[in-house]
């Protein structure tokens, strides 16, 4: 089931814009966390954490030996490992520990950028610009990744703590069963599949 997040308003030099798919997130880096906003960008190959966010979380890189391409130019960047929680209308969509690039301070970004890696590899993402919202659904992982032929644990977590013995911990949403794939292959003759 898709979980939705309304676009967060963003104020730039030209005023407030609600037309960008900005969502509320909590960034977790090295035991510290910070609430901020992230742009969901299907055109970005990688994801970024702004230098000012990394500095606030005391993980700003000192080496910018990596690079990325944007606007037809090559730009230097550092990196860090982070976990993100996207705060949706009813749930939290969790991005597990992943690598994020950090631009140089002179070329800093105003918000996090969530690109193909890791977000779109983990989730089905649907944009509804006319409703100023974006939807997320965890993708089932390939059957060979799980030890038992299924999912390797949920990616979507409920915001409400569970009662009882697990109080204080996040309650994980149920994950759908994974359909088993047939191991039977169609009969072939001369490299072609036979017609019935």
Image (cartoon, rainbow, N blue to C red):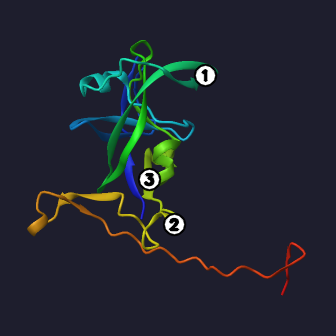
Q: Which residue is mark 1?
A: 71
In the picture, measured across the screen, residue 156 lies left or right of residue 118, that is: left
Q: How far apart, in angstroms, are the residues tagged by discs 1 and 3?
A: 28 Å
Q: Residue at x 35, y 62 (%)?
A: 154
Residue 41, how many percent across, how many down? 50, 38
Q: Which residue is mark 2?
A: 144
Residue 186, how many percent across, how many down? 75, 80
Q: Are marks 1 and 3 in contact (CB under 8 Å)?
A: no
Depth order, front residue of 71/32: 32
Q: How far apart, in angstroms, are the residues tagged by discs 2 and 3?
A: 27 Å
Above or below, 125 against 152 in this view is: above
**Badge nearest the viewer, 2 or 1:** 2
Q: Residue at x 42, y 73 (%)?
A: 148
Residue 28, how many percent across, how many down? 27, 39
Residue 80, how many percent across, how many down? 37, 32
As helix, strand or loop, the secondary structure at mark 3 comes to strand
In the picture, measured across the screen, residue 32 lies left or right of residue 102, that is: left
């Amino acid at each position: 089931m898709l979980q939705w997040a309304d676009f967060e308003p963003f104020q730039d030099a030209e005023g407030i814009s609600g037309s960008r798919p900005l969502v509320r997130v909590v960034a977790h880096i090295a035991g510290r966390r910070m609430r901020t906003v992230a742009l969901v960008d299907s055109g970005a190959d990688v994801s970024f954490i702004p230098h000012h966010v990394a500095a606030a979380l005391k993980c700003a890189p000192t080496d910018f030996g990596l690079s990325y391409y944007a606007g037809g130019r090559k730009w230097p960047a550092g990196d860090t490992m982070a976990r993100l929680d996207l705060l949706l209308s009813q749930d939290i969509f969790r991005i597990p520990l992943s690598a994020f690039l950090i631009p140089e301070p002179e070329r800093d970004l105003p918000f996090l950028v969530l690109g193909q890696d890791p977000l779109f590899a983990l989730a089905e993402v649907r944009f509804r610009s006319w409703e100023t919202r974006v939807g997320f659904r965890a993708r089932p992982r390939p059957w060979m990744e799980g030890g038992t032929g299924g999912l390797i644990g949920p990616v979507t977590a409920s915001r409400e703590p569970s009662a009882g013995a697990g109080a204080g911990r996040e309650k994980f949403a149920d994950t759908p069963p994974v359909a088993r794939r047939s191991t039977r292959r169609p009969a072939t003759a001369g490299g072609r599949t036979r017609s019935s």
